[in-house]
Image (spheres, rainbow, N blue to C red):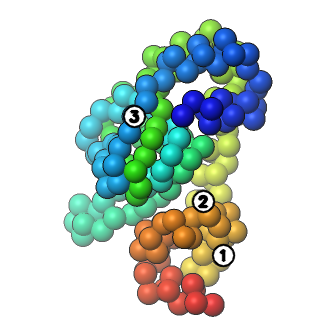
Amino acid sequence: MSQLLRDHIEKINPLTDEEFEYILSHYKPKKLKKHAYLIQEDDYVKYEYFVVKGCLKSFVIDNETGKEFIYQFCIEDWWVTDREAFFKGTKATMNVSCLEDCELLGISMADRQKLGEQLWKYEHFMQIKINYGYISLQKRIQMMIKGDAKERYEQFIKQYPHFINRIPKTFIASYLGISRETLSRLYRH
């Protein structure tokens, strides 16, 4: 469980065994079954999670229509939380649920800050990951604004080819902001 986290951090900063053991001591393991919620709207969010195993989706539900809008999938080697709720100590405005059985490592805000203050390597790592996450979000927003359904689908396939056989088509359609029928037409071509 811990080797994936170490490999993830060491893509940016090499660690000694002692440094990694100290970092790992601040994480709490969590296991969830398929369909379980990691975060539910209106709950306080105490942890940011590193995905060790499994696949999750982040989404909001339109209160009037009950329609689900997916804006992120998370798989192994990715991070997930309701960022605003986690950082501000407010209630979640979104949901995160498991599409598969999941194993996660969670870190509290206090422990995250403590590690950042005590280990420059960890702070540098987190800063780089935040920037990559922001770039990813920026690209997603641009794709949703500028791309038509076909372009969004092609970009999704190019960026996440490993998702196609792992995530139900209905959820991919929601992520792309298109109907399941439109996705079926694009998928056949």
| Camera-nearest residue between 41 and 102 | 102
Q: Which mark is residue 154?
A: 1
Question: What residue does disc 3 label?
Answer: 30
Q: What residue sits right under mark 2 in the picture?
A: 140
Q: How crowded is mark 3: few (under 14 residues within 10 Å), some or many (20 or more)?
A: some
Residue 65 screen position, x and y as percent: 24, 69
Q: Do the residues labelled 1 and 3 touch (CB within 8 Å)?
A: no
Are circles 3 and 2 on residues that touch, CB within 8 Å? Answer: no
Residue 35 position within the rendered picture, expressed as x and y whole percent measured from the top left: 31, 55
Sequence-wise first label, 1 or 3: 3
Badge nearest the viewer, 3 or 2: 3
Question: Which residue type does callout 3 highlight?
Answer: Lys
Q: Where is residue 185 in the image (x, y as percent from the top left)?
A: 53, 90
Query: Which is more toward the observer, 43 or 30?
Result: 30
- Is 176 situated above or below 116? below
Where 126 sits versus 64, above or below?
above
Observer able to see residue 93:
no
Position of residue 51 in the picture relative to residue 82 (left or right)? right
State which tag comes first along the sequence, 1 or 2.
2
Q: Which of marks 1 and 2 is in front?
A: 1
Inspect this view and state whether residue 25 appears: yes
Q: Quadrant location of the N terminus?
A: top right
Inspect the image, locate mark 2, and give the three-letter code of the amino acid beneath it: Arg
> As drawn, which residue projects farthest toward the top?
118
Circle 1: residue type? Glu
Q: Which residue is drawn at 50% across and 86% down?
A: 184
Picture residue at 65% right of the left edge, 57% below the top: 139
Q: Is mark 2 on a helix, strand or loop?
A: helix
